[in-house]
Amino acid sequence: MDNAVALSEQMRAIPLQNFIMLSLILFSIGVMGILMRRNLIVVFLSIELMLNAINLMAASFSSYHNDPQGQAFVFFIMVVAAAEVAIGLAMLVMIYRNTKSIDINSLDKLKW
Amino acid sequence: MVKPINVNQNILTIITTLIPALPLFGFFIHIFMKNKISEKAAGFHASAWIVLSFILSLVLFFQLNTTDAINIQLFDWFSVGGLTIPFAFQIDHLSIIMMMVITGVGSLIHIYSIGYMHGDEGFNRFFSYLNLFVFFMLTLVMANNYVLMFVGWEGVGLCSYLLIGFWFKNQEYNKAANKAFIMNRIGDLALLFGLFLLFQYAGTLTFNGVNESLVKVVPDPQMLTIITILLFIGACGKSAQLPLYTWLPDAMAGPTPVSALIHAATMVTAGIYMIVRSNILFTLAPFTLEIIMIVGIVTAIFAGSIALKQNDIKKILAYSTVSQLGLMFFAIGVGAYEAAFFHLVTHAFFKALLFLGAGSVIHGMSGEQDIRKMGGLEKNMKITHWVFGFGVLAIMAVPPFSGFFSKDNILVAAYHMSPLLWGLGLIAGLFTVAYMMRLYYVVFRGEGRMSAEVKSHIHESPKVITTPLIILTVLAIFGGLLNVPHLFGGGKMMMHYLSPVVPMDEEHMPAATEWMLMAIASMAIVLTVVAMRVKYMEKKQVPEADANIKGFAKVLNHKYYVDELYNAVIVKPLNIFSNFLYKIIDVQVIDGIVNGTGKFSTYCSTQLKNLQTGAVSFYLFAMALGMVGILLLIILM
Amino acid sequence: MFTLLLILLPIVAGLALLVLPQNQAKQIALIAALATLGLTVATYLQFDANGGMQFVMDYPWIDMLGIRFHIGMDGISMLMIILSNILSPLIIVSSFKDNYTNPRLFYALLLVMQGAMNGVFVSMDMFLYYIFWELALIPAYFLVLSWGRGEAAKVTFKFFIYTLFGSLFMLIAIIWLSVQGSSNSTDIANIYALQIPAETQLYIFLAFMLAYAIKIPVFPFHTWQPDTYTFSPSPATMLLGGVMLKMGLYSIIRWIIPVVPDAVNEYGKFVMIFAAVGVFYASAIAWVQKDLKRLFAYSSIAHVGLITAGIFTVTEMGLQGAMTQMLAHGVNVVGLFYVCQILYRHYQSHDIAAMGGLRLKAPLFAGLFLVVMLASVALPLTNAFPGEFMLLNAVYAINPWICLFAGSGVILGAVYMFTSYQKVMLGELNTKANTFTEIDSLDKWVLIPIVLLIFIFGLYPQFITGLTEHSVQEIINIYNTKISGSILK
Amino acid sequence: MTSVIVLAAAGIASMFVGVFNIKRLALPLVLLACLAALGIVIFHYNGGYESLLHNMLVFDAFSYGFNVIMILLTMGILVISNFYYRNNIEHLSDIYALFLFSLVGGILLCSYNSLIMLFMGIEILSIPLYILAASNRKNLFSNEAGLKYFLMGSFASCFLLLGITFIYGTAMSFDMGVIAQYVNDNQGNLSPMFIAGCVMILGAFLFKVSAVPFHFWAPDVYQGSPTVITAFMATVVKVAAFGGLMRFINGTIFPETAIWQDLMGLIAIITLIGGNILALYQTNLKRLLAYSGIANAGYILVAVATMNEATYAYVLYYLAAYGVGSMVAFTIYFIIKDQTGIDTISGLKGLFAKNKFLAAVLAFAMLSLAGIPPLAGFFGKYAIFVNAINANEIWLVVVAILTSLVGVYYYLRVMSTAMSSGDDIPTLDIHFSYKIVLVAGVIILLLLGVMPDLFVDLIS
Amino acid sequence: MSQIFFYALSAVAIACSLLMLFQRNAMYSVLYLLVCFFSVAGLYIMLNAQFLAIVHIIVYAGAIMVLFLYVLMFLNLNTPSIFTKSNMLRLAAILTGGSLFLLLFAAFYQTELVQLPAPTVDTTGSVQTLGKVLFNEFLIPFELSSVLFLSAMVGVIIMNKKDKSNG
């Protein structure tokens, strides 16, 4: 217990802003990644990164507000992240089977 | 001024209604049993109806000795917003004379037509039209209000259209018919506007109502001038005055009896009748009267001069009609309504006579109308020659024939205004003399110039044709006695008779002047006659072929190129303009705008769709940008 | 009750047609139309011209927006009902000869359209009115689309979209009015009761007028009309020209004049000007048409232009004239287009140049055509004359120069009608005309009633004016009171 | 809540049915489940306000109406899909299950009272859809559709989550009641972070309802996915998304109009213009319907932008009308495509000649979508316009009117092509299940159009 | 000294994520992201959310990333991806991301965030608290996440199950 207290006191030395800042940066990097890469895998990774950024933010809010709900929320995000990854990779495999490519723009038959 | 009538109103109603109804009835018989009745029967009953209504008119005429007017109210035609148009007749001294002229001359012409139209495939149709015409003409003169009069007014226009285009296989005739109707329409529109304004002014459109209100309200000269001018334009259309006269000569396309009845005796005089009918109104608008006078006299001289160089026997008579009508308007212009009306009556007699005579000539010449191919008919067609001769004398105003008295009336009235006008009137008269003499000599005297085989069967027309001619001759000779001036101890019967409708102005001028004027006039006439005789009898001149007509004669022969002028100035430009409206404004501009909007949106669609590239990465981009966009939007606001 | 029947009878009959045998479709349709006519007569006999709104049915319908099912008839509605129900049997008979494919649907649509138009004339709730207004459009659309000739498909789109374009603005106006009053009600009472500020009235006026100007059509919103009339099957043309455009004119009287009087007072004259110019414009264009049906289409524009101008005088003279003329125009248009159809059956085109000399072959036809033509140039004793007289009179009282334009139709009308008649019927008979035969009894069953109507209403217009006088005065009273009220303010 | 459980359970059950290879039972099972759920929703609803388990879910009039509509539409889709999937029988039960799960998500999305549930709802709604979209795995189009939908979807949900977190960070709770309280407390000076959060959530919703400029996925996905799925997306999912959107705005930021009103108005306008204009060009019927879906979203956004208490009824009405209309349209599309391979509008030429019934139904659907009285589509628009003009947004309505004119054009083009002559299309045989759906659809369209009150009584 | 920890960890996280971004070979990207996640986990611990940290490690490092690697190897995709976007697009991407960042940053920069003082006994992130929360307030979402997983499973099966036809 005591070490927990100590830790929390030390933590408060770091302002909340820094955490938010960090997670925003990570989020934006994720966005860039999605927009920048055509490799399906990397795009998925970027999404994961974004989700993590959000996790971090939620977690920091929750602990700075002394409110566990935030962290509970993080769990749900993880759940969804996991599910999405599963779907995404399955889709990737399927598409790779059909097109032998993981370029996200390899499929652009539907247009206009 | 209308006294109650003591005789049995119902009988009068029936009689009065029958007068127009009988011809209409005749018309319907023709329509419904078209080809079931023989030519003879058709002709007979058609004429019978007219004769009957003539007799009935006589009955009314005698009835009118006891009273000034008979008013018959049938039903209200339509009434809205304070305007009530009754379907009612008003028989007064003015209309009864018109009625008798119409039915009288009408019946004669009907009888005549039985002979003239004999064997024409459209015989029955012809008579049905004639009956219809008489019906409308009677409505016109019997109406007790302007709108009902307008009904007759348009109706006779319709009949004239039908009869001019009677031989409808010939598109030229049809064109002439259209021309007549359309030109009348121009006048009619003006007339309508005049009526609207009159309604605003007087609050009613019955003749009596208008007259009473004119007495009541303080006259507004400007308004009255506009009203009367509009009415007069209407009259111009109907009575073929400048500038709306050109249809009348073309109207000669119709069968000759039609020309006689419609385009000489009755319909074309409707304008005169209308103005005389509303003389109180016109008297209040002196400016209009001046205009009428000028238009009248100009038309008279103008048309007379044209008649000088025409070679179609009917065209000559047509122009003479125009010119005579001009004289009547001239008379109105100088304020001598009763003189105008008197001339109307006599003119009805002698012009009908002349036309029918001409018809008989044409009939004898087996359809030839060009006077240059005639001549010397006095030998072959004696009766026709004689009656025509008398007609000529009458129209030339040679005493003591009817024309003399009526024209003399007009001239005297003109002299009252100013001697100058008298002079102009005289000149117009002299033109008449000139072209009538020319016509007479070229057609009846000298040698025949017709082809041999035509010559072979020139023949006098049958009784059925000549009899009406003779009757008309009698009328043409003695018609003058209706209104003998005091000078000859006459009582100016007609003038007095009309006095309830047309207030008479009894001005006396010294007998000497009157004698003198008459002397000068007669002298001039005689001189012209002599001149003509020299030209066409002694010198045996014949009007040249169209090819070698030179100089001013050519202008006259081409009627001052008025038709061409109208064509170039009005018809063609209007047609071009209409085409412009259709092809450019309607199709290109207005419809273009409408279709353009549609085209534009499809164009937008084809452009916009390129955004939908199908590449996911682009969609992701768009989405991110969208997020940025809305964030920016909100943060900024 | 009568009112409802007048709407339902044709519609139900039309729907019933769909399941009845194909080959008797036309007869059944005719019976239905005649039944409706009979019903109309019965209604008319019980109708009291001075009784104001009659045969009213008024039930709540859509509570959530305070919309009521409110129908009823005053003189004006009665007249319009008479018009549409007199014409529809004639129109149906007129179509007997040319066997349209799939007659069941064809006549069903005709009847539904008739019912819908009746609905427009009797509905006293703007929402209901709008529903019928659009409902009338749909059958017209299908009629023109499926049975039209030439570029029907293209033309139909234009017709539908264009008219809808106007109607939708009317819809906005209706909604706007409805939210002004209490509980969004669109009932005529609420709408009439509204006191709308003068400046907003303008927008309402424009929105309504756009719809009606397109429907009528008033120059310059007319370009859909000639094409549509030309390419649609003749019964559709008759319905469009004979009845449907009256919906627009009727609506001006019912929904514009009493609702936005100040705007009418202020800007009505501009509409008058457009309408009057349109008369000249359309007549001039009609003169240079080479296609007979198109010519008649343009002439119709000219005629309704005059009516519109007359309505916007907002005088008893003008409105009554409009009433008389609407009926007359309906009858004449049907006559003219039927003549067109008869010619089309022979020539398979409306090209004037190809015709000529028909009078020799068919004197009776020529005569009847002549009468119809004379009616359409408003010769006295034909039905069109009293109306035209009143209209011109009313317009003249407002402004002679506008009247000059409006009156130009009197002359130009004679020009194009007589010239076309001459080219079509008169002259030497050309080879194509040789095979032309005199009209038979079926044609007579159409044309002779029309001619009779022409003379009946020509001789006794009191029938119409008497019927509508009271209602018209009512409208004018509302108008004047509102005007004076706003002047006091 | 019970209904949710029932549906979820039914989904699982139907999987088992699949496992035990008794496919015949699948359809009756799921339909019964839906009926049961419907019954529960209707009878369990006490007209009041039922809040569950720490305000996670709320069942009030609002969610009630939306749920009813969604369940009904789903039933329709299930009926169609039975015949649609007659050939690939092996996954049928799983697909049913996914439908039901997705429906569960939809119900949650309309009944959430906590941002967490909002999030879960959206995900539970979407993830089955990603799968369904790609479910035709041999077909490249289907793959593409699935991929696009998935990528965009997860990208969008990232923003949603960020938004939720922002709100959580500022309002210190996920509970909407608390958030609403927070909004009320500091009206006017809400912290930018909160506002940003709300905007991102709105953005996520706009994505789900496929509003311009977040619409790009819609046409492709709609076109690529199996038709039944498309129908599901176009109907149920739209209903759910709008339900969620309106609930979010109502439940939290309603008083702070500055945040959402202009935004929604603006988006509505560009959506209307974009959707309608783009649809003009289309030649493929399915794609056209996709664009019409976008356009219709625009109309509903007009209502959302001018929201008040009564609005949700109008929106619901509109959604029902639109949903039924497009479901009918999709069904017809599939019938034709399935038997003749025609999927273009021009291909419809001469449909009327041999298939009067189909053509007539198509005409009804198109007229209703085009908003021609007396069909349901018209009154939907009318109500929405009344709503908008009540809020004095006349220009919004003018835009809507003008664009709807464009809409009329392309809907009518479809209809008139089907009506026009030429008999390219042979007589098609229509499976019983389709007949049911089509007839029912037409009846509903007419009934709703003629007496909208029926509907209003049904949903409240 | 916690400061140092924080900055170090965040530096690592950012650096790795950037590296992940600019790797041409997907395999490396995965590994870099893995490192990034570990540093994030470290941050969780600093936030006194140990349980969260552990779960994070387990789920992400243990499950998700492994899944990625599995797929990569399974499909043998560890060859450098030849397809890249034009620099123009890269720039655009960076700009978009950057501007988004700026906006969010501006949003949160202008708000003073609530920082409650740490309670004497901070049990926010402890297992018990979270457990309570999850099974009281968040019971429904918790249950429903099962539905989520279920559908995910079904999806994977539907999409990749070998069907009998082409064995």
Image: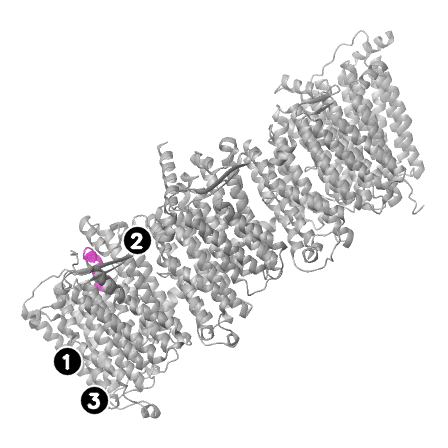
For residue B267, what is the image quadrant?
bottom left
Spatial separation of the CA atoms under disc 3 and disc 2: 59 Å
Q: Is residue B72 left or right of residue A61?
A: left
> Residue D355: x and y, percent?
70, 55
Label 3: which secondary element: helix
Q: What amino acid type should be assigned to the residue bearing mark 2?
A: Phe
Marker disc for residue B196: 2
Q: On what subunit does the disc labeled 1 rest?
A: B
Query: In the image, which residues are magenta?
Result: B280-294
User: Both on one chain, marks 1 and 2?
Assistant: yes
Spatial separation of the CA atoms under disc 3 and disc 1: 17 Å
Q: On what subunit does the disc labeled 3 rest?
A: B
Identify the residue under disc 3: B538
N-terminal of the two: label 3 or label 1? Answer: 1
Q: Nearer the viewer, mark 1 or mark 2?
A: 2
Identify the residue under disc 1: B526
Q: Are marks 3 and 1 in contact (CB under 8 Å)?
A: no
Q: On what subunit does the disc labeled 2 rest?
A: B
Q: Do the residues labelled 1 and 2 touch (CB within 8 Å)?
A: no
Q: Is residue C387 left or right of residue B448?
A: right
For residue C377, what is the image quadrant?
bottom left
| Chief secondary structure of the magenta portion | helix
> Residue B425: x and y, percent?
18, 70
N-terminal of the two: label 3 or label 2? Answer: 2
Identify the residue at image location x=46%, y=57%: C300
